[in-house]
Structure formats: structure tokens, C-alpha cells
Image (tube, rainbow, N blue to C red):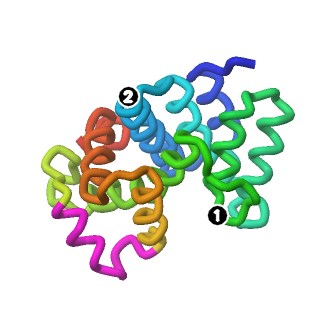
């Protein structure tokens, strides 16, 4: 099977109806596409991997189920091994170390995309347009802000990619700006 974006969107929406989760998937897709361009990788493959990485989360939100259930579904559907492995390796409790650039990137952008969206949502204009790295770093220090975002995972992800944290934040901000209307952040 060589899935395309439509296949990925259909899979995502078959299992996910929560608007926030759909926006998260779109954000991770955009960040994955930005990094694919940066690294000279296949933007379509990386994008659809980002889009479907949490497709099972709404129905299976616990660590003992997610992403294992999704991985099983992808394997049953015949999705390519590199996409399945990347989805599996973004889970912290899986027996799948992040080996390939796509694996490392998915892990690196997953949590950060959520933090960037949260930072934009609390701005007076609720926009990504003027959001800067220093604004994200300010909110980063406030442990009560976006409490569910694991800052250690973000730091580890940037380190695994070999990208400085501020540059990583900037790449994700710029990627999310390209889809700001879909995120209701324009």
C-alpha cells in the first residue's frame, strides 16, 4: 500500500472526531512537512505520518493502548513499514527506539506543536502571526502553563535531531503559520 494524504485523512477522521485532536494532527503534519523539506526527505510520506500519528488516541488514550492499537491497525491495513515504525517509536513506552530521521522528527515535533498552539491561543490576537521564539520560551518557564506538555520530551527531541532548541521552536512556529487558518490561529 502506498497511502496518500486522502487515505491518511480518512483514517484519521474514521477514528477521531475531537476538533482539538484533529488540529493537533494537522499541526504535526505541517511540522513534519517542514522538516522533510529541511532534510531533503519525502514530504508526502513525512506529512501523512504526522497526520496519522495519533489517529487511535481518542479511542485508546492510555499508554498501554496508544500507539500500540494504532500500530496494529496500520499493520492490518498494510501501511508501509517506515510509517508504522515511526508511529510506534513516537510512543515513549514502546520497544521501538527512534532510529530513522522520520522517527526522531515525529517525536521532536509532537509535543512542541502543542506548546506552540497553546502559546498562540493565549495571545491577545489568538494568532501565530506575531508569535516569536522568545514568547514560547517565556511560557516554557511557566510550569503551570500547558502543564500536559512534556518539556523534557521537546528538549530530547531537538537534541536527537541535532537542532538547537530555539531553532527547533522557530521551525515549528513557521510551519504552523502556513496552516494557521485550519488551526483557527490566523
Q: Position of residue 106 (x, y in %)?
A: 52, 46
Is 27 displayed left or right of 120 in the figure?
A: right
Residue at the location (48% across, 71% down)? Answer: 148
- Taking the image as shown, residue 57 lies to the left or right of residue 28, namely right
Residue 186 at x, y percent in the picture: 23, 41
User: Could you tell me which secondary element the residue under label 1 belongs to?
Assistant: loop
Residue at position x 82%, y 36% in the image: 75
Q: Which residues are magenta?
A: 134-147
Pointer 2: residues within 10 angstroms few (<14), some, or many (20+)? few
Mark-to-mark CA distance, 1 and 2: 26 Å
Q: Which residue is denoted by mark 2 in the rendering?
A: 37
Magenta span has 104?
no
Instruction: Where is residue 30? Give x, y as percent.
Output: 41, 36
Q: Would you name the residue on which mark 1 appears?
A: 92
Q: Is residue 96 shown above or below 29? A: below
Report the residue at 32% width, 38% height from top: 175
Name of the residue lying farthest toward the right: 76
Amino acid at each position: 500500500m502506498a497511502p496518500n494524504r486522502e487515505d491518511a485523512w480518512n483514517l484519521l477522521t474514521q477514528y477521531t472526531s475531537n476538533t482539538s485532536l484533529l488540529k493537533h494532527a494537522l499541526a504535526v503534519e505541517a511540522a513534519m512537512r517542514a522538516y522533510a523539506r529541511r532534510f531533503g526527505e519525502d514530504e508526502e510520506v513525512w506529512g501523512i505520518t504526522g497526520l496519522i500519528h495519533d489517529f487511535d488516541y481518542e479511542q485508546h488514550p492510555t499508554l498501554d493502548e496508544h500507539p500500540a492499537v494504532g500500530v496494529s491497525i496500520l499493520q492490518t491495513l498494510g501501511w508501509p513499514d517506515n510509517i508504522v515504525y515511526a508511529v510506534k517509536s513516537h510512543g515513549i513506552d514502546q520497544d521501538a527506539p527512534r532510529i530513522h530521521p522520520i522517527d526522531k522528527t515525529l517525536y521532536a515535533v509532537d509535543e512542541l506543536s502543542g506548546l506552540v498552539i497553546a502559546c498562540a491561543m493565549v495571545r491577545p490576537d489568538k494568532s501565530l502571526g506575531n508569535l516569536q521564539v522568545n514568547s514560547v520560551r517565556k511560557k516554557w518557564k511557566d510550569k503551570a502553563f500547558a502543564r500536559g506538555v512534556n518539556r523534557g520530551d521537546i528538549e530530547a527531541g531537538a537534541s536527537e535531531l541535532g537542532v538547537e532548541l530555539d531553532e527547533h521552536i522557530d521551525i515549528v512556529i513557521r510551519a504552523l503559520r502556513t496552516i494557521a487558518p485550519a488551526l483557527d490561529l490566523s
